[in-house]
Image (spheres, helix red, strand yellow):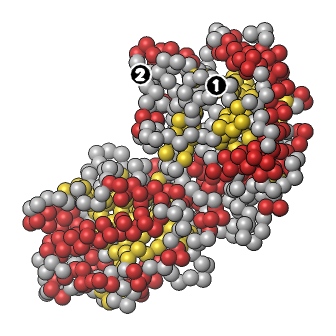
Amino acid sequence: MAVERVQTIAFSSILVDTIPPEFIRSEKEQPALTTCLGCIPQVPTIDFSDPDEGNLTRLIAEASSEWAMFQIVNHGIPSEVITNLQKAGKEFFELPQEEKELYAKPPDSKSIEGYGSKLQKEVEGKKAWVDHLFHNIWPPSAINYQYWPKNPPSYRAVNEEYCKWVQPVGHRLLSLLSLGLGLEKNELKENVGGDELKYLLKINYYPPCPRPDLALGVVAHTDMSSITILVPNEVQGLQVFRDDHWFDVKYIPDALVIHIGDQLEILSNGKYKSVLHRTTVTKEITRMSWPVFLEPPSELAIGPLPKLINEKNPPKYQKKKYCDYRIRFYCVNLTLLQAVLFQPPTDIERVQAIAFSSLSEGTIPPEFIRSEKEEPAITTFHGYVPQVPTIDFSDPDEANLTRLIAVASMEWGIFQIVNHGIPFHVITSLQKVGREFFELSQEEKELYAKPPDSKSIEGYGTKLQKEVEGKKAWVDHLFHKVWPPSAINYHFWPKNPPSYRDANEEYTKCLRGVADRLFSRLSLGLGLDEDELKKSVGGDELTYLLKINYYPPCPRPDLALGVVAHTDMSSITMLVPNEVQGLQVFRDDHWFDVKYIPNALVIHIGDQLEILSNGKYRSVLHRATVNKEMTRMSWPVFLEPPPELAIGPLSKLINEENPPKYKEKKYCDYVYCKLNKIPQ
């Protein structure tokens, strides 16, 4: 058999009590680490037989706005209809593998229908612990009985019976959701296709898994549909993301689980939320579920309803044909999907948007392809890699610490410090809010864009400096100052996520203490007074400039660069990376990867310290590569002198044997020359 199904893998995995590595999720996804086990808020449960239609409308609208998911009881579908649906689906998955493969989705099919395992591309190359069967059940013109199992013999009859009952539920839900938006009863249904609305059934089969703490049945996602109506079995597994936590959705016998899908979020202009959910698996029991996705016709264009748009509530989503929306879902992960599919028209094409289309096409635009002297595949050294120095910043022996930092600054121009005193939660909060900013809709990110005529570097943007060969870097960024208070322009500090400002201010408070100690060690390492270097780069007027680099997945990381080879203009740079490899340093005529060390700070010696030390400390030449499947991010803070401060070699370090190697220059003039490639 050409394709190995999860059901088959599960059998062999249980025998050896382990699972293949491609099913092991990263720590940020592992259920054992990410599931909230405290007080669990319950997804709303609504009595669908409530005769008070006004109250029922209110409850459904509130649940759709606040939770994007709810369960309905007393929905009118007889218990035996649901039981028969479950029984037939279970019997199909218990058939011999050879028989199930008769209904497999053809490899070259553009349709989603059929029996299969892998559904969408995951950027980290992982796999979900699930097999499935898709087929349309309504309208009759959309049904392809080729994908309806003939065994068990009752399969067609029970699915048609269930379809007969689930349609009125779907129609009533859409009418109540319409009323909840202040629209006419039939308005939402008409805008998702009316009588051409498709009912697509999926059967999810999650076999027992020996390591349910490490695997996921279905990864975090939102549904593309308008709404999803789901029948679970009694095995716990559905989880919803709320208040930054993953919560179990309690199983309620004979209830239907309702998900608000992407199309209703778009139509409602964000009033109804498309629910982020996932599925866990169990060690001893098979879990199954039967979602029905209510999908618009392929060619129907969907965007925010005009009645819900005004000056105070402008459109948040771009109008798009459902077929275009849907096909892209299977090419990218959730983060990229949210960033691109909901983007409004913009005059500037961001790399995050370019990455989306490039991933689906498997190529990149020519302006991102580097010359052979720069291509990472050709220029990265793959032999023995010397390691950038790692220094314990908590070393109580100040003389030894000074010596280690000075030697690293002279020989490498870069080093990593551990035990630096910045709490782990402060760094993770900084990373979390930065990541959440780049996951916002494109329209919201553009609110913080660097104005085209601005002389300042601050703001959200893409292109930073002129490249003499006309090439582009595979990165978007956000710049803003974080210290001193007099230099801060909060216009460029995102208001969303709401915790962005607090997280950045807390990090800055911690970082300043580390920076002051670094300057003192670097001064002493040159034989200067402890405070001399800091005074020479501005003292209390020293500016802390934060940059967030966002390097989206790139289909040709062998050809592209995230940031080209450069040295930093700053005095020193203090950088927090994420766990994705990308930073490289140039040493001994080779490019070497800088090993990622959890919770370490990467310290770059910048141009101003090289100038002040008259070349004794080296400004490090470095660059950033990109990854085919994962997003890389980094948070450098550049410690910059005041613009009018003139910097040149310190007189104490100059003599006849060591004449000045650099001209004294105002920092603002230095920056202008460097960004515009003017010799200096």
Side of 300 relative to 489 (left or right) = right
Residue 483 visible to an observer of this rendering: yes
Task: Tell me the quadrant of the picture where the N terminus can be found.
Answer: top right
Residue 566 appears in the picture as rendered: no
Q: Residue at x 45, y 16 (%)?
A: 14
The amino acid marked with disc number 1 is: Pro
Q: Is residue 153 above or below residue 492?
A: above
Percent across and percent down for residue 528 are 14, 80
Residue wearing tag 2: 18
| Label of residue 253 in the image | 1
**How much space separates mark 2 and mark 1, taking CA atoms?**
32 Å
**Circle on res. 286:** none
Q: Which-is-in-front pick, marks 2 and 1?
A: 1
Please give the count of numbered marks on the rendered protein.
2
Give the secondary structure at mark 2: loop
Mark 2 nearby-residue class (10 Å; few <14, some 14–19, many ≥20): some
Image-based side of 186 in relation to 214, left or right: right
Q: Amino acid at mark 2?
A: Thr
Residue 568 place in picture, x, y as percent: 37, 71
Instruction: Kindly identify the residue that appears in the image at 52 percent across and 27 percent down.
Output: 281
Instruction: Determine whether label 2 and label 1 are within 8 Å by CB.
Output: no
How many residues crowd around disc 1 within 10 Å: few (fewer than 14), some, or many (20 or more)? few
Viewer-closest of 478 and 358: 478
Specify whether 288 is left or right of 583.
Answer: right
Q: Quadrant of residue 312?
A: bottom right
Q: Position of residue 471 (x, y in %)?
A: 56, 65
What element does badge 1 sit on?
loop
Q: Nearer the viewer, residue 595 or 559?
A: 595
Chain-order first, disc 2 or disc 1: 2
- Quadrant of the frame with the C terminus: bottom left
